[in-house]
């Protein structure tokens, strides 16, 4: 990325999930922004889920599909009147298909400051290894 | 100043020709989205972060979603009736040699001043940053609190 550190942040509208399966309870569902990057040993996924606590976060993995679901507690006290509302709050939901390269037994997740960090280690044989050639 | 708005759109000044095009494009997107039935016409000032401003009898509450920001990177000030929130969001320098597949989270500086619709008491301001949500609660000045009047 060639962006410098001092560029200004622009506001982004929160993206609603476009065609979700219907929920049983009414409410909005948003897609969290994610960064996915890969190093030699693992894949790391960072997802912005502000307002989600560890107990409200569900990470489900079945048949190579990883599903992230985060629940939000409603933020307003009962006595409050709205003056200006610029963003809505709602659940977060996003699904990813994992390739076979991921070792599903060793996935780790950490949630801090509203950012989920998922570490998906690669299967041992998929990490590049140098093979030494002996002479003779 | 914040007016209680229902459907007005705030206007922007275009700084470069591309700003104007970008603004038209995003407004067009919103109009088209509106036709598909999801409610999206939400007036914003176009400045990060988006805030929700609410009040009750004694206090104003300003909330913003700031995931990934530590309290050390955030600067909150109250001057007169204006609340200013500024800081920097670092998306983290990751390991050398990392290859990005997706990059949707952005980092950078932000600064926003919100005019509060009423007199406030700058001595009694509390700010909490929990799970990436900032909540600033500002006590109203005594004169601005509603007073119940008894009818005899």
Image (cartoon, coloured by chain):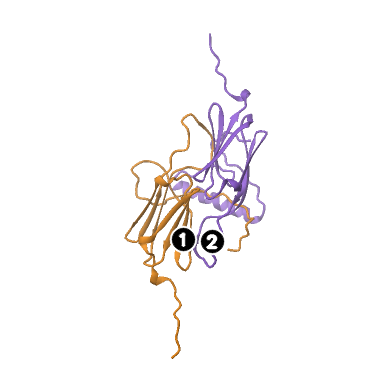
Chain colours: A orange, B purple
**In the rendered view, does A49 fall on the left or right side of B13?**
left
Residue at coordinates 46% horizontally, 30% vertically from top-left?
A: A78
Determine the secondary structure under disc 1: strand
Q: Quadrant of the C terminus of chain A?
A: bottom left
Please identify the residue farthest to the top as the structure is shown: B152
Q: Nearer the viewer, residue A129 or A24?
A: A129
- Compared with B2, A96 (above or below) is below
Percent from the top left, x then y, of residue B60? Answer: 56, 32
- Chain under numbered label 2: B
| Residues marked 1 and 2 touching at CB (< 8 Å) | yes
Percent from the top left, x then y, of residue B114? Answer: 62, 39
Q: Which residue is mark 1?
A: A44
Q: Nearer the viewer, residue B3 or A43?
A: A43
Q: Which residue is mark 2?
A: B94
**In the rendered view, does B11 fall on the left or right side of A41?**
right
- Compared with B108, B45 (above or below) is above
Q: Residues within 10 Å of mark 2 (few under 14, many from 20)?
A: few
**Does residue B22 appear in this view?**
yes
Residue A96 found in image quarter: bottom left
- Chain under numbered label 1: A
Residue A120 found in image quarter: bottom left
Determine the secondary structure under disc 2: loop
């Amino acid at each position: 990325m060639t962006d410098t550190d001092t560029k200004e942040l622009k506001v982004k509208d929160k993206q609603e999930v476009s065609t979700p399966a219907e929920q049983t309870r009414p409410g909005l569902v948003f897609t969290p922004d994610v960064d996915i990057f890969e190093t030699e040993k693992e894949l790391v996924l960072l997802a912005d889920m502000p307002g989600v606590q560890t107990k409200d976060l569900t990470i489900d993995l079945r048949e190579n599909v990883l599903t992230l679901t985060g629940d939000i507690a409603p933020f307003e006290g009962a006595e409050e009147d709205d003056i200006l509302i610029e963003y809505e709050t709602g659940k977060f939901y996003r699904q990813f298909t994992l390739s076979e390269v991921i070792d599903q037994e060793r996935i780790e997740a950490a949630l801090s400051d509203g950012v989920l960090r998922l570490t998906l280690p690669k299967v041992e044989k998929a990490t590049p290894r140098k093979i030494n050639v002996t002479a003779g | 100043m914040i007016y209680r708005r229902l459907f007005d759109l705030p206007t922007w000044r275009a700084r470069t020709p591309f700003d104007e095009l970008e603004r038209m494009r995003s407004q067009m997107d919103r109009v088209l989205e509106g036709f598909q039935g999801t409610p999206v016409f939400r007036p914003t000032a176009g400045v990060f972060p988006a805030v929700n401003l609410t009040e009750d009898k004694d206090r104003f509450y300003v909330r913003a979603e700031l995931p990934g920001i530590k309290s050390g990177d955030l600067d909150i000030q109250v001057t007169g009736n204006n609340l200013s929130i500024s800081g920097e969001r670092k998306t983290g320098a990751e390991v050398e040699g990392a290859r990005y597949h997706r990059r949707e989270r952005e980092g950078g500086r932000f600064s926003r001043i919100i005019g509060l619709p009423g007199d406030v008491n700058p001595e009694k301001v509390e700010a909490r940053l929990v799970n990436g949500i900032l909540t600033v609660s500002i006590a109203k000045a005594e004169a601005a609190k509603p007073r119940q009047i008894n009818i005899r």
